[in-house]
Image (tube, grey):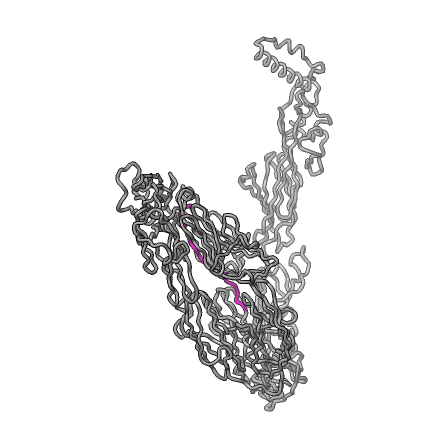
Amino acid sequence: MERTRTRAGAAVFLMLILGHLGNALEVPLDPKVLEELAQPPTITQQSPKDYIIDPRENIVIHCEAKGKPHPSFSWTRNGTHFDIDQDPKATMRPRSGTLVVDISGEKAETYEGVYQCTARNKHGAAVSNNIVIRQSRSPLWSKERNEPIRVQEGEALVLHCRPPAGLPPPIIFWMDINFQRLPQSSRVFQALNGDLYFSNVLKEDSRNDYICYARFPHTQTIQQKQPITLLVLNHGSVEERKPTFLIPSGSSSSKMVLRGQVLELECITEGLPTPEVSWSKLSGEFPDKRTSIVTFQKILRIVNVSDADAGEYRCTAHNRLASIHHTIRVTVKAAPYWITTPRNLVLAPREKGQLICRASGTPKPTINWAMNGIPIENSPEDSNRKVEGDTIIFEEVQTGSSAVYQCNASNEYGYLLSNAFVNVLSETPRVLTPANQVYQVIRNNHALLDCSSFGSPIPKITWFKDSQSSTLEGDPYMLHENGTLEIYVAQALNSGKYICVARNTLGIAENHVYLEVKEPTRILKQPKYKVAQRNMNVVFECKVKHDPTLIPIMIWLKDNGELPDDERFLVDSDSLTITDVTENDAGTYTCIMNTTLDHDSASAELTVVEQPDPPTDLELTDMKPRSVQLTWIPGDEHKSPIHKFVIQYTDSLHDHGHWHNLTHVPGSKTTAHLELSPYVHYSFRVLALNAVGLSDPSNPSHMYKTNPAAPDENPSGVKGFGTEHDNLMILWKPLSGLQANGPGLQYKVMWRQKDVDKNWTSVTVANVSKFMVSGTPTFTPYEVKVQAINNNGIGPDPAVVTGHSGEDFPVQAPNSVQVLVLNSTLAEVHWEPVPPKTVRGHLKGYKVFYWRERSLHKHNPHRVEQQFLSFSGNKSHGMLPGLQPYSLYLFNVRVYNGKGEGPASSNLQFETPEGVPGPPSFLRITNSNLNNLTLEWGPPNDRNGHLTGYILKYQQVNNSNELGPIEELALPANKTSVTLPNLKYSTRYKFYFNAKTGQGAGPVITEEAVTIMDEAMPSRQADIATQGWFIGLMCAIALLILVLLIICFIKRNKGGKYPVKEKEDAHTDPEFQPMKEDDCTFGEYSDTEDHKPLKGSRTPSNGTVHRDSSDESLVDYGGGDGQFNEDGSFIGQYSGKSSIRETAEAHSPVNTTTMNSFV
């Protein structure tokens, strides 16, 4: 885990290096101040020293400068004044020194030369570098006729390019006539001078279009050399040669390079085989990150050369014949480079100052001073100025002594020129830092409060805090020379207002600034290292705490760059999720929490693992008749170490296209010793296994053919057995092609009768895996063996296996068969085993065949199909379970072997005793009345003996399904129905019924039924409901209730009183009919009355009441017309449903009728 933290406002000292004297002024950068200050010229832009121009375009030589007042410009060419007004082609841009030359109609070389610009105002003159103007050139190739080059195969060769000299030099490359680059390698390559070198030529190098091209970058033109024809001859065998250096020659050489430039060392060799080149530094190591070895190891390149790169470099070339060396001594020279650049001075009258100009180089450069472009020795003398080598010292400068000084540092490899002015000013103090500026800093960091000021003489700066009168000095404060106040470790108590005061002899100025100390940003939960397989999801967490007044911005980086523009990268407020990870997602992920003042960051690495790449470059070595050495180069592990390599083979002779595992080796090895079989055409491949899985297979190795040999082994799985009573089948597993060891594979099959024959009978067969011996005695032991033979010899002595000839059916039935009946469902059979000779095969066991002849009961005469039980081995008894009680059984016993069953013993019989009966065949309720029920049943299908009777139990079931006490009734065996009297009407009952024999009671069946309700009352109520007087009475009552409701409503709203009688008289129903005398009562409910169904209903023969439609429709129960009150109420009765529950096999519908009272 890598974690970095950076804080804004770090300890960056703002001290201005003002030279050795503390009273030197810096030129202020504030534009408002600059506009008011006099200032000598300063060059701000100029063209490069070496300026190559395009002859097709105008010449533009840049020269820009600033100063107060604005400077004027002039030019020199080749050291003399260049009068622009006298040259109609030359102009200067307005308020600029940039020179523009229109070369249309002119030759550009007319204006070649050395130019220098001077910018001048009344305070001094600044000069530019010497600018060398040269025209770019791309000359044509000289015409030449190239004769075909003939060279012997294997010899070295150089094809020269020799391009025309151009400015700048051209870029060289070789192509064919189709503008395709010629292939290069360690044998054929291009040197730095553009020539094409062959360490040795091959026949395929012959061609007629070796073309050298020169591209001139400035003009973007390409010149082409005439094609070169190369003919490679072959006059016999090619002799090998030791390496020889072509470039550079000899054993040593030297090279000079300038500091900062690129060092290129070239080592070109020839030889056969092609020499390999390597580089080393005798006096140290190659510099990191600046060194590269290119062009097939032929060129060593070091960029940005430093003095440390000087020393001896060795190039080594070797092939299998010899090794040679060449040493190159490298020296580093240096054009001048700055150590201290002279800086502008702003001084008050009578102040001191100095200009320092220090440069280095190899050889050491010479320092020359000039003032306003004139060598200082030729300038007017000044007693207050003294030149001491690279320094000019000023003492008590005077007003009007402002000037621009030039420092020139030069040696044989170049020069440096720098302008620096001395400006003498008198100015009152000014604070340049903006007023009321707010500084924000993170707690425990440096706080820097700026008080940038300007004045001449230099103002003195003092600081105060809030309303305090004492200056801020000492711990924890530090005042820098430029006026900046530093607080070493800022705390919350340092927040507040600060006052900066600037004073000099001419005046005073002050400024107010504010400091706010904030809490630091901290990552509380950092992302953690992740290892993920491809297509998985990864989540990096990054939880942060920050100052609440600062606005945070979370940024995620991958490998210090932006996250890929991919929708798989999901950035949340405190996490980064990567879905469906790929190998390209591996890298370092950094979460950065930025505020305006600071940031915190934390990084974690994501490693994406996947199956390795397949191994490459399989090679076979140490080849022997029965073994070979296999080596390979592992593929990319993809960040997951390889655990092992799996070696597979295919046999193109016997099993082409099918690959088999041969062996495996640890992942740290790249070689395997393979044990081989004779007469196999092997090809090998290797697979790599890591934690993710197996790689794809490598490309197959070259085929390796092993020589044939005699078999090393005999067939396995040899067996001897018979398929018929007079034969012997000899069976074996044939050898595979890999086991055959050679062509002409055959099998020598041998057999003899055990303990009878001494000699073996044999036969040789091919392309089969079995052999039949006929005419053998029945089930006789034989010794058999099978030996492998091929064209190269016979296999080892085979093992002997014992088998038997074919079996035949047994010839004898078991004797002394007896049976013992243990209970009503179980019997035990005994017999005497037959003699082994009569079995005539492998004794498998005995089978008892038995069947139920009939039941001992007259009602069950049917016969059951025969069944059997097998008893393995040489048994003499067996059990017969699951018998039917009270039945007659017949049985016999047979011995059996692999061929089949022998003759059966004589049929014997036995009887099973009585058992408990099966369940009754049915139970149903046939007649349901008010207080009694009739039950009918059928005898059990399986009586299992003589029935002695039936047991009936019953109990009430209430509405909550709770059971009442059980009543029990014993019934004789000859009855099939019973009527239960004195039951409670409209009550549910549950019945339990079973049969019994002398052995006990059988299983129970159950049934449920409900007694019907008393129908007298509903019938009488139905009669009343259809009478006219009753309907009229109900209407009158409804009308009266309505009148009363109206009176109450009026009384509540108006307070009036109305006689009820009047309302009744006024609303008498005209259809009201008086009741008949004989129907004036409803009658009493009686159990003795006839129970008739309602008019319009249907009662089936079994007494069950069915509804014709919905329970809510009562018209059908009232004679056809429903009667309603005025308010829509229905007058009538409801008839309930019957409820029946059934269990076991019996289904008996029972009707019940219930009555609902009406309102």
- Tell me where residue 185 appears, x and y as whole percent: 56, 74
- Tell me where residue 681 appears, x and y as whole percent: 60, 80
- Tell me where residue 742 appears, x and y as whole percent: 61, 85
Q: Quadrant of residue 1100 in the image?
A: top right
Question: Is residue 385 placed above or below 217 in the rendered structure?
Answer: above
Horizontal side of 470 relative to 834 (left or right) equals left
* Residue 242 vs residue 523, the one in the foreground: 242
Horizontal side of 229 relative to 467 (left or right) equals right
* Residue 812 vs residue 390, the one in the foreground: 390
| Residue 225 in sight from this viewpoint | yes
Direction bottom: furthest residue: 759
Quarter of the picture holding the C terminus: top right
Question: Is residue 1013 placed above or below 99 in the rendered structure?
Answer: above
Q: Main secondary structure of the magenta part?
A: strand
Count of numbered circles in the view: 0
- Residue 600 among magenta residues: yes
- Tell me where residue 1147 appears, x and y as whole percent: 65, 44
Direction front: furthest residue: 86
| Residue 653 in sight from this viewpoint | no
Question: Is residue 469 placed above or below 569 in the rendered structure?
Answer: above
Horizontal side of 765 relative to 349 (left or right) equals right
* Residue 31 vs residue 940, the one in the foreground: 31
Highlighted magenta segment, given as a residue range: 591-613
Quarter of the picture holding the N terminus: bottom left
* Residue 215 vs residue 303, the one in the foreground: 215
- Residue 51 among magenta residues: no
Question: Is residue 147 placed above or below 526 in the rendered structure?
Answer: below
